[in-house]
Amino acid sequence: MVDRESVCKACEGTGMLADDEGWQYMCSVCHGEGTVHKTASRQAKLMSVDNNNRLLD
């Protein structure tokens, strides 16, 4: 049984996110795991974007 409290709300447990054009990338909240641990730090990581606000890897 899946604990609903630990499911990543950003990617809904899939571990992947998609932009407006359909490009898929790893979830930056759960790092592709699909779950968020309650003990994990909630500090946001600043990411680089291009002129179209697409994330730069």
Image (cartoon, helix red, strand yellow):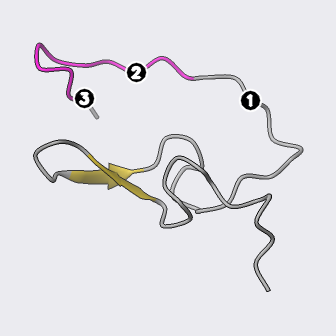
Disc sitting over residue 56 in the figure: 3
Label 3 crowd bin: few (<14), some (14–19), many (20+), radius 10 Å: few
Q: Residue 43 colored magenta?
A: no
The residue lying at 52 percent from left, 47 percent from top is: 10
The residue lying at 76 percent from left, 66 percent from top is: 4
Q: Amino acid at mark 3?
A: Leu
Q: Which residues are magenta?
A: 45-55
Q: Amino acid at mark 1?
A: Arg
Q: CA distance from mark 3 to mark 1?
A: 22 Å
Q: Position of residue 23 (x, y in %)?
A: 17, 51
Q: Toward which corner of the image does residue 34 lie, by quadrant?
A: bottom right
Q: CA distance from mark 2 to mark 3?
A: 7 Å
Of pointers 3 and 1, the one earlier in the residue sequence:
1
Label 2 crowd bin: few (<14), some (14–19), many (20+), radius 10 Å: few
Q: Position of residue 18 (x, y in %)?
A: 28, 50
Residue picked out by circle 2: 47
Disc sitting over residue 42 in the figure: 1
Label 1 crowd bin: few (<14), some (14–19), many (20+), radius 10 Å: few
Disc 3, SS: loop
Q: Quadrant of the N terminus?
A: bottom right
Of pointers 2 and 3, the one earlier in the residue sequence:
2
Q: Quadrant of the C terminus?
A: top left
Does 43 sit left or right of 12 as displayed?
right
Does 1 sit left or right of 12 as displayed?
right
